[in-house]
Image: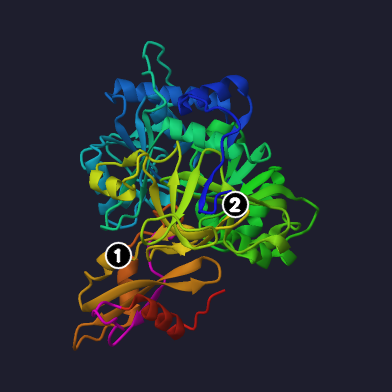
Amino acid sequence: MSKLSYLHINPATPNTYMTLNDAMKRNAEKYPNTEAFIYRNEHGDRWSITFGDLYEKGQCVAQYLVTSGVQRQDKIGLFGPNTLARIVAEFGILLAGAVVLHLNVDVKIASDSNDVLEKTKCKVVFVDPGEHDIFLPTIQNLKNGRQLIFLRKPGSVYTDPVFIDDIQTSRDTSVELPEVQPEDEAIIFTTSGSTGKPKMVVHCHFDFTVGVEAYCELLPESKRAFNDRPFCWLGGTQAFPTVSGFTTVFTDSNLGSSGKGIKLIWKIITEEKVTDAMFMPYCLYDLLAEQDNIEDDGYRLETISTGGQVIDKHCTKVIGRFCKKMVIAYGSTEVLGIAFHLVENSEDFETGCVGKPIPGVEVRIVGENGQVVPVGEEGELQIRSSFLTTGYFGEEEMTNRAYTKDRPSWFRIEDIGKMTESGELIMRGRVKENISRGGRKILPGVVDDVVKKMEGISLVATVAVPDVRFYEEVCVCYTATDGVDLSPSDVERYCKENFSTEETGDGMGSSPTYFVRFDSFPTVFTGKVDKQTLKRQAAERLNLTPR
């Protein structure tokens, strides 16, 4: 191994040059009667769809889109909670040669998603009004002349609605679906942007087929996996089970993030005979907190996978009680998978360790001067791989900033870490002041932009404060205009009126949890707000200590 912080592991097998559509067809032909996805809700109800039916219904949706004028590589919006209908819609979009545009709504008037829809010239959006039409007001804001296709029937009257139930069974063999290439764009994920508007991370079919295969090289073969992450996030994307061909059991994402559903989730896992599960770290904390209240009948998962933040030794205590082994997965929306760590003994685990790069990934660690640092020194991680994002849609300057000027260039992941003598990566945190709440990255500036519009606010600075379950929570620190009596409860009420929660994938979005009023902010010698001191003071006032 080099004395400098550089690692690369060659793939054990050559890349498979195919599309997600090819994988769908392969699964349908190989496992036509095998359940592909199983949905369980909090009431105990169960719905499922086989690989064969999923492909058949996806083709019907694709034919409808093509006959409606959708062209190859058009962007098609997709909004709503995890459901089987949403999966059919996603498959239909891809089979039509179009691009899935996942929508995350953080602001109640949906201005963030409308910006995305306008920039991509999206004319069709699949929408789910949710139970009791909870998302219908948001959907009204998304229309703006676009065709809406409903994933479930709203309870209230809607003018000339089109329902997926009506089109997913109408096969027209005269309609020819377009041929899709591996380099064609497949999925766009929307993430928080530093400007206050979402970044659109573009991935082509080849990114997923190669990236998932590389990751699966390191895992025991999964037969039945559980994953409750929102489908609109990388961690919940249906591209993974599509390429790997395993059965996926899922629930509503809010069930896990609420902190009240872990016993039910474990019950579902045992009933469905799940072999492997993906849990966010806060769910692991919930499992451990409830272990005395969960019957130990000897059932053990083969693996539990986790990630999204720095993982500490406490999380690994699920080994032996709930699983045989644990997988620490390290990646990002832009890069997909980066590193993989299989943990068999919690005693040997070092906090922050994410293991070695997955096959096909190059990692280097650089200092402030841009030069690679010696092994053991901390620095900023940079990544090269064949499954990196093709860029941020419509943002050439942002894309250029994300890559170095080397040829071939490196992607700036903006994480801090170090490399060990044994070739493992130890993560320390983020370069920027992003808040990591339950694996979701929240940009303080996005929250600031909403709060500073409140009448009576003078200054606002959103910071991270420690949290036992979510690792970090969102805290709004503010000063009021002279003579204005603006209490934390006033600001909290304003945020509840302006931030979306139920409409977001995880039921939380970017909505802040804590509110602290200051007479003035601490500053550094340049006059700028001293964020580190402000974070410490906010946590002290709230009586919060790191876990």
Where is 282 relative to 478, above or below? above
Extent of the magenta region: 508-529
Name the image quarter holding residue 274. top right
- Asked whether the viewer can see residue 125, the reply is yes
Determine the residue positioned at 49% across, 73% down: 466
Q: Position of residue 479 (x, y in %)?
A: 27, 82
Q: Estimate the spatial distance between the alpha carbons at disc 1 and disc 2, rounded to whole Å.
A: 36 Å
> Magenta segment: does it hold 527?
yes
Amino acid bearing label 2: Gly
Nearer the N terminus, badge 1 or badge 2?
Answer: 2
Q: Residue at x 34, y 29 (%)?
A: 98
Say which residue appears at 66% left-offset and 58% top-offset.
263
Report the front residue among 250 and 392. Answer: 392
Residue indicated by mark 2: 423
Q: Amino acid at mark 1?
A: Gly
Q: Quadrant of residue 67?
A: top left
SS under mark 1: helix
Q: Residues within 10 Å of mark 1 (few under 14, many from 20)?
A: many
Which residue is rendered at x = 80% and y = 53% of the image?
Answer: 298
Please say if 485 is above or below 411: below
- Residue 8: % across, % down: 53, 43
Predominant SS of the magenta segment:
loop
Left or right: residue 35 compared with residue 526? right
Circle 1 residue = 445
